Amino acid sequence: MTDALPHEDPDPAKPWLDYRGSLALSPAPRRGYPSARAYEPDPDMPAHWRTVRGLAAEAIADAVDSAETDPGIAAAMRAYLDGEADPLGAAAVFETAAAVTSLWDVTRRYVQLDAWTDEHGIGFAAHALMRQCELRIVNQHGKAYSRSAWRQDVPAVQWAPAAPLGAEWGRGTECRQLRTWLSALPEEEYRRFRPLLEPYGRNHRQRLVRAYVMPTERDWAAEARADWRERDSKTWTDQNRLAGVVDSMEELHEAGLTVHTNIGGHSPAVATLVEAFGAACAPMFVASVEAGTREYQGKQSIHEVIAGLPHDAAVTYLLANLVTERTGPLVRAAAERFPRRTLRLIARLAEDADDSMRSRYAHLVATVPLLEAARAVAEPDVREAVDRLAALADAPPEAAELPGFLASPPWTRKATKRKKLVAEIAPFGEDGLRWRDGERDRWRDSADKAQRQLAETGDPAEALAALAKSAKEHRILPPLAGPAAARIAADWLVRLRSTRLSVGDWLDRHGADAALWLAPDAVGRAAKPRKAAEAVLRDVARRLGGDAVLAAVAPHGEAAVASVAEILAVDPLDLDGRKAPKVPDWAEPVLHMPVLLRGGRERLPREAVAHVVGAMALDSPAIPYAGVDIVKEHCDPASLSAFAWAVLESWEINDAPAKDAWALTQLARFADDEAVARLEALVRDWPDRNHSKRALNGLEVLGAIESEAALRAVHRLTRFRGSKAVKAAAVNQVELVAAGLGLDAEQLADRLVPETGPASLTAEQVKRLERAMVDGRVWRAGEFRTRLVAHPLLGEIARRLVWQSGPLAFRIAEDRTFADLGDDAIDLPDDAPVRLAHPVLLGDALPAWVRHLADYEVLQPFDQLARPAHTATPAETAAGRLTRFAGRKARTGPLHGLTRGSWTAVRTDNWTNALERRLPGGGAVRLAFTPGFGGGPYFDAEAVQVVEEVALPEAIDPVALSEVVADLAKTAKE
């Protein structure tokens, strides 16, 4: 069996043979190594150079004549242009031409070295290349040159400054081509280049380039390494060059290059280091990836290189990052290349790994044949550790007896077909509206246009027609009553996750009537409507009981009641027409996890763990599967949550196949608070990885988890800036949850504030209370005492603020009682209104309150009493406009900046010519300006806008008015 194992020891004499990866590497040719090869100049390059000179002729002439060009350089440029073999002039002319033209447009592979070689030979080309390192292009003002359609710079050429040390000036040299040329020259010809390049050690760029093109010259290499530590700037290109200079990884580390930033498998440095040092470069590659290489910089490709290196650091990295870096396929490749090493490292890592990773390691050992072969010849301690891993020796024993469902779920047995009773019955009931107390008034002032329209018209027909076409406005579903609304709710229940809360609210509101309206579909012949209606009837039965459903459908007659009774009589564990679930391949690696029974003394056998996965696949937040309830009843919650999270991870690292989206939704039934926190982190991360749809689905799952931690997570996401769609969906969820509890979103937020938390939580609540002051939010005194004053965290903030009940201002004393300006106690009835005081409300009492807080050495958490108080003039009130701003000018940037706060852009054909600030009590302030600006981020921030009008609603809270004036006073100045 040992003969079947591959050789996996590095060869110090030929390190380039150590690499066994699948990614093809292309090292910079190095003398004495396999990469050395003869260089073949491009015969078309001289013609390309003539084209470039023609395109840049005017700019070259301007540079020669410019007062900013160094006289010596100008003279050299003239000499070269006159046909002399002047390397300095050649370098200066080319740098100028490269600055003002696009070499890419001339040819995709432009190599100036070839053109110079054609003109005066390779020696001349080498001189010119080194002179490039001494030059930089500036404009007519001596500043950095910029080729732009918006700014007409005239080029000039100067000597490159000595500082900052390490800076790149100009286009950069083509030293790889010269290195290639020299790599295969006969020794005698090669040695002639030493004296040719000797003089070019005047700056850091020349010293590094010189060492790079002749890496055999160890004194030059030592100079380049010594320079590296002193550099102010260390570019990616120079890192590649230094990698091609050193003779050992130790030299590279001594120079200070222990991590190669932005590394990728296709990087020249990677190929060069692998050729020179083989497996010895693995620790540096691992350190470089861990330092922050991103996907677009080549993380996948460097992983492929790491997987081809026989080194403990490489294999350890791949094993430890099976999930976080999705290295699973590469781990298998490494295991086949280096089975003994991989097995030894699995034994080492498994000791401290969590259950999920131990399961993945056990699956790897069981499914890679060479690892089993390696186990047979492994050291005793390695073999023992691997055997314990496979046997789950550190976990509780398997349960001898299991609940019937976990031992033999329905899909493992032949199912009996159910004959569905069909009855033709007519719809019952009419379309209408059912409002909760105060709901219609709240919707009239809603920021949601569809809600406002339904509240104002009171006509359900238009709303039903819109919802039948699209679920976009699903928030208006709950008050809609009747058969048409019921059909929409049923369809969404079985088909859409995004409407779950709206459908849930609708079912809560209409109860048994939903069964009455949907009975014709539930007992009808059409398959899709029947399936949806049956789902609703079962949902109502779970909520109210089967008898309530049968009583509700009684008006349809005995046949309908009998048919519905058949529907409700189906065993909730049966598949009832659904496909039998199968464990996907991607889930196999986590089936070895110990899922414990309650009490923690026994665990499920692997077959039963697979049945848990099957139950997950049949379940959804909208239509729960009864088998999941049995799993939760008999299994340890923490163990289930850990397993559920491992299932999600396995799904995600295998490209999250859409057909198995249940791997995400199952968390709604199993997630504990730790899983909630991890899911919230994923929802925030997914949009950055172009998974916005997945983020929205993850948010829906968070909303379906029945815990305060999950509701807090959703509420935090209402302020998420990484995705407008996620933020809007979170706001929608919070508002629907609040409405279901008879609260508004801010009342719900009060209930979700933890008693303690980090400084960021305090800062978040400070901002929320400041927003409450600006919005004129009102608490009732009883709620105020319970939710704010008595709250450990909110109470500390509230005591540093001034409050009002009607005209009476007060503060919260140390004993949590209320005191006025004279420190007299105030007793407020529970129904008394309470709001945060604002300078415009305090009026003449403001100075006294400022002194009062100063006497008590109270430091306010935000500018409450220090903020300006603005009012409208009588003429402005009569006109309904803030006439003081008409004709004022404002820059577009600050105007657009208002949209980051309480203002929204009003766009017509993607052109913004107004902003609106909606007011909590209804209505909006509208700021109109001209000429306006284009939508999106691409506008001239300095362009001037002229205010045309600031229109006010009929009634506006004085605090809102003051804040509007404050916003505009900062933006539209006189």
Image (tube, rainbow, N blue to C red):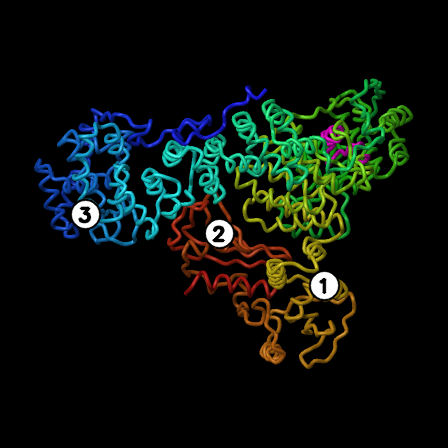
Q: Nearer the viewer, mark 2 or mark 3?
A: 3
Mark seen at residue 157: 3
Could you say whether the residue bearing mark 3 is in a helix, strand or loop? strand
Depicted 314 relative to depicted 767: above or below: above
Residue at 62 percent across and 49 percent down: it is: 718
Instruction: Give percent across and percent down for residue 879.
Output: 53, 63
Check if residue 625 falls in the magenta segment: yes
Q: Give the position of the N terminus as an image quadrant.
A: top right
Viewed as shown, does residue 819 lie left or right of 571?
Answer: left
The amino acid type found where label 1 is placed reads His
| Main secondary structure found in the magenta portion | helix
Depicted 753 relative to depicted 181: above or below: below
The amino acid type found where label 3 is placed reads Val
Q: 10 Å neighbourhood of mark 2: few (<14), some, or many (≥20)?
A: many
Q: Which residue position is annotated with label 1?
A: 791
Q: Earlier in the sequence, mark 3 or mark 1?
A: 3
Which quadrant of the view contains residue 777?
bottom right
